[in-house]
Amino acid sequence: MEKSSGDAIAKLAEMASPQCTVLRNGNKMVIASRDVVVGDVIIINTGDSISADLRLTDVIELKTNESLLTGESVDIRKGLEAEDYDTPFATNLCFATTSVTNGCGKGIVVSVGLDTQVGKIASQLKKSSKGSKLTPLQVSLNKLGGLIGLIAIIILIFIIVLAIIIKYKDPAHANKDPLLVIITIGVGFAVSSVPEGLPMVVTITLSAGAKYMVKKNANVRKLPAVETLGCCSVICSDKTGTLTEGKMTAINLVTFCKHSSLCDDSNNKLTKTFEFYPTKGFEPYGGLFDVTKMTEENKSKICVAKNENIPYDTVLYNYGNPENNSIDVYKTRTLMLAAYLNSYDTTLSKDVKTSKWKIQGNMSEGPIIVASAKVGFNDINTMVQNESRQRTISSSDQSDDTNYQTNTFVTNKYIRIDSLEVPFNSVRKMKIIFYKLKTENKFEHISFETDNKRAGEGNNKYTHIALIKGAPDKLIQLSNYLLEEYNGILRAALDKQINPKEKQILIDSNLSLSKKALRVLAVCIRPLTDNDIIKLKKLDDANERLNFFINCSSSSSNSSSSNSNSSSSNNNNNNSNNNNNSNNNNNSNNNSNNNNNKMSDSMPIIIPLGFIASFDPPRFGVKEAIKTCREAKVKVIMITGDQKPTAIAIGKLIGLISDNENKKIEDGQESYKAEAIECAELHINKNPNEALLPDDILDDYTDNVLIYSRAQPEDKITIVQSLQRKGYLVAMTGDGVNDAPALKAADIGVAMGINGTEVAKGAAEMILIDDNFCTVVSAIDVGRTIYSNIQKFVCFLLGTNIGEILYLSVAVAARMPFPLEALQILFLNLMTDGCPAVALSREPPNDDNMKVPPRKKKKTNNDKTLVGLWNYTPYYF
């Protein structure tokens, strides 16, 4: 009925580049990818598809796109040393099937074929396909076929023995050889015992079901999967784009700033929240307003102002209006500018043909680009022309300000240093972009000069800025200074570090937004000197730049020698103590300046500007679909990469979990399980780099957990296997190459039709054309209906066969002429009985179709008083 996992493996093979450039015997030559061997030196350039796993020996601004392997759309910067040796996708390696998006380089082939990372995935697919899985329907039909065969043999032997004993002769053919008559009788009985129309009707039914599912936006690749969905007991679903629309919109903006007189004054708030409005998909029209004034009446007035092209300030004060001047406007616009510049490789444009706005680049940065337009950092006319770019300096000419491209007015002020970028990945959970400041010691409205002149001492002027965007739980912990309002200006409070009370306020603000089902991004800045930039340029590895960025600073120009750097690094604790003493005592100006320089050496200046909170609305009908699953006793599990509070809030919003998200399970031991956990908890010491917990503990988790946050693709197969050990029939959704083993291991693999890779689609039994969770639930309903109808027509066909056996047996026992020839019986079974059976297969679903539990893989029946074979048949279904 269907192909094996060979389709998925074939897709993996097709992903290999047909040709590549290698160095052999000092000569450059182009060879077929299949001829590459371990030890070859491959030359790679922008646009090339990599043919094998390479260890890099030479790189020039090399970036690759590994989204097919990792699921992350952000390009990965490559270097000669690995950033993290524990990750399977080290940054000093390039991997087969990935593509070069920037730069060039050389590498030595270390793995080819099935030894590559993508080859290992293919091996997992091949391994999981050994002894191809039988669906519940196939198991049931196999059992039924065995039963029918056994009964047919018994009846055949019985009738032949009976005919011999009574010396049966066919009155209609008295001259025939008695032995030939008995053989003919045996064949007739054998034919009448077998429902020849059953395979035909089952195939027609499954095909019709598959055709109907296409109308419901589900493309079934393997026919038995149509019915298998009927006994699905668990659906493991992605969040973004499946349970939600996948169109995040910035809703709230939170700024962090204290007054110079704040201290312990509770009347002054450290945080202030604003709201973007209107928020309609990716449309860049709207403003930024005080959240406390966003009543339904004011929202209606703002919508009217938008439609009539009236300034929003006529309704409410628009903090996104560049023409307004206030300290809050400075805070909000500076925060949005930092986020906008950090998201330089994502653009917003309008399709002239469809008049729809669309994001090109990283979808997670889409809300930032849209929000930036609402505060005036994007020229909407330019976006319509689809030409939004930002000003950059190439690494080969980093000191030349003339080497740039731009057509947006805001980015003329800031020049990006592309070679120092620290790209986002699932380990770092942050992205760092470096820009040159147009004015020393000043970024937009923020001044880095303070009373104690920490900035601006000698040559230690801040000439560059690092813009950081990432996970709030990580960036809050790294933050150590705040902005402050001082005499009507916005400045960095570099003379006083953030205290635990202030940091807790930031943590609570993140938690508050996450509980509203908002995805929160923190935005921070770090001022840098020329000396810092010089040191960063010497670090080829992004992880080294990240460590330098987080752990130490070298703002003092006096620390240029290696000995002084080492000394400064070894005496950080002493320097910190000196700083504390200098803050508590009034020393001389020279000592004070000296201590401030020491503080600069020992601790980086990381200033949180605020949060941008985006909302990815649930798909229409998802809440009702989950309610339907609950009534049908089908468990729904959500797997997401978001932080836990956001995942819980979304789970509550769609009705997946109740307000009481945690529950305690008593099993004789002290154990505490929650309906939502981070996937790190599935590993020893809650460390995702360590081994998994024992199977019994894992099974205890998966039997109760409904939401998995901070999930990686490899976590999916762990969850699937654990659920299957507990006896569940699992449907798993996925879209990336790394998801393919989990899709293959699941009883029903469901790939995304819009965002799914070809490998994922090849490994799946069903493809969601619209990437919508509701489609899976509709498919389960159809699957249950098909199974119910199969039961009906199987019982009908077996009933007609039993009738034939009865009247043939009576004819032999009464020595009557044989009523039908074997060929006639065959025709009756195939055609006369087959057509009514097809009609039965098109019966509408029962009223309680989605209100009863799914049948189990190995269903048992305690009813031993079965009357007739047609009543006994459901035992096998």
Image: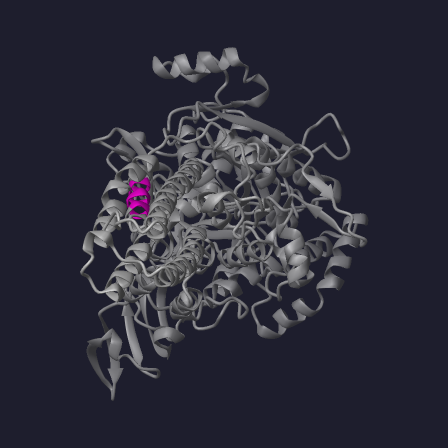
Residue 133 x, y percent position in the rendering: 43, 60
What predominant SS class does the magenta segment belong to?
A: helix
Which residue: 31% across, 68% down?
50
Left or right position of 40 against 674: left
- Please state which of residues 823 and 371 is positioned toward the viewer in this rendering: 823
Give whichever of 827, 280 is nearer the camera: 827
Lateral position of residue 293 relative to residue 622, left or right: right
Query: Is any atom of residue 411 visible in this view?
Result: yes
Residue at the bottom extreme, as displayed: 25
Indicate the colouring scheme.
one colour
Decide if residue 78 is in sight here. no
Closer-to-camera residue (169/24): 169
Does residue 671 sit above or below 119 in this rendering?
above
Q: Residue at x 54, y 46 (%)?
A: 525
Question: For residue 537, which quarter of the picture?
Answer: bottom left
Q: Position of residue 357 (x, y in %)?
A: 31, 32
Towards the viewer: 589 or 256: 256
Residue at image point 33% right, 47% down:
202
Looking at the picture, how far across and down is residue 162, in whole percent?
39, 59
Number of marks in the image? 0
| Above or below, comparing residue 214 to residue 35 in the picture | above
Residue depicted at x 62% and y 40%: 645
Toward which corner of the image does residue 206 lie, by quadrant?
Answer: top left
Image position, residue 699 (x, y; %): 64, 56
**In magenta stretch: residue 202:** yes
| Magenta stretch: includes residue 542 | no
For the N terminus, the quadrant is: bottom left
In the image, which residues are magenta? 201-210
